[in-house]
Image (cartoon, rainbow, N blue to C red):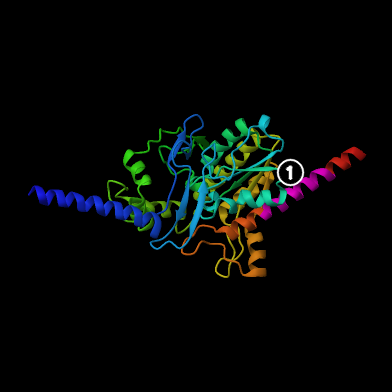
Amino acid sequence: MKTFIARSVLFWVGFAIVGELFFRFVVPGTEVPITEQNKDYGFLHYDTSEIVSGYFTTGRLPHERYYWEINNEGFLSHHDYKTPDQREKPVIAYFGSSFIEGFYSNIDEQIAYFVEECIGDQYEVYNFAFSNSVPSEHLAVSRFARDKYEPDIFIFFSAPWHLKLSTKKVPFRKRFSINDGEVVEGTVGDFVYSRLKRTVKYSAMLRYLYLNARFRLNILNNPNEKKEAEENAAFINPGTINQSDIELREKIGDYLVRTLREENPDATIIMAGGTPYSDNYPEKLELENRILKDACERYNCDFLNVSQVFKKEYELHGTSFYVEGDPHWNTQAYRVIGHAICAFVDSLNTTNDDAMEVNAEE
């Protein structure tokens, strides 16, 4: 009996070692950082004291590996962020979700990199995007960025369903609610990262099974995940959007843009919206993006329609903007957006210079 137990232990130890080596070097399991919470401002970012670099992979037989790094503030970036007294150039800060965060590209192929490629002599570019975040959270992060880094230009990317999703309650994430017809910012509960999930992050074999192969156990994952996903889909995009649903989104969009303008009176604020263009996805602005565009006109902000720049690139080169087998945007999408931001900022600077000349002449 003792011999059987000893052999069993040796077998499973050997299996674990072989599995770790196999899923670390042969079929690499994806590597991801550990999440933590900024309790002062109420937003999530990545822990800078543990896993700060790695390779992100997708699928059961990952053929692409994307190298990422976490900087001093816990966001994906190829450089640390500097406070005003540490730098010489003004800052462009952008905010958004996983579509622009950068895990699906190498660290030197992100939006920030492509913007700095063309106007890096004029600006530093800081990425404050974070996976699964929505505009209510972007507002919270923008307050942190404003207080510590004082950006001259704020750019907010919003997916076509994110305004309403900003009212879907998640205890440890910043959310909006409606009280007596007015938008109210909710309180944020504490975020706790379980030891079990932390252990998973350090094991290549467990990461592969959990994140690549999507093999989920109830102790690691919410057993109601499918039900919640269906509820989210219905919450975000009901079969028929009625007038009350439109009014909710309009209130959220108006509050968001108005608050950003009030809290950053001297900064340039750009709301960016739209979707990658292709034969299957013609150029259009979804309801929520139109709402943000209208709000920008009311509060002296700017709107960047990324659908237009995607369309131009697609018609010229037939470029695909999605990661293969995944709905996230790829490096080509980041390149197009980065260069569009450069052109947009240049146009704003030109307009401001012309206005200053006119005022001087008067």
Residue visible at 63% across and 57% down in the picture: 335
Where on the picture, by quarter, is residue 148? top right
Question: In the drawing, does residue 146 fall left or right of residue 231?
Answer: right
Where on the picture, by quarter, is residue 256? top right
The location of residue 182, given as percent across then percent down, is 53, 36
Q: Which residues are magenta?
A: 339-354
Residue sitting farthest toward the right: 361
- Examine the rendering and report whether any part of residue 28 can be seen: no
Residue visible at 42% across and 37% down in the picture: 172
Magenta segment includes 353? yes
Near mark 1 (Cα within 10 A), the count class, few <14, some 14-19 or many ≥20, is: few
Instruction: For mark 1, give the secondary structure.
Output: loop
Q: Which residue is mark 1?
A: 122
- Examine the rendering and report whether any part of residue 68 can be seen: yes
Residue visible at 38% across and 61% down in the picture: 60
Q: Main secondary structure of the magenta part?
A: helix
Residue sitting farthest toward the front: 3
Magenta segment includes 308? no
Where 213 falls versus 256 (above or below)?
Answer: below
Q: Which amino acid is tagged 1?
A: Gln
The location of residue 362, given as percent across then percent down, is 92, 38
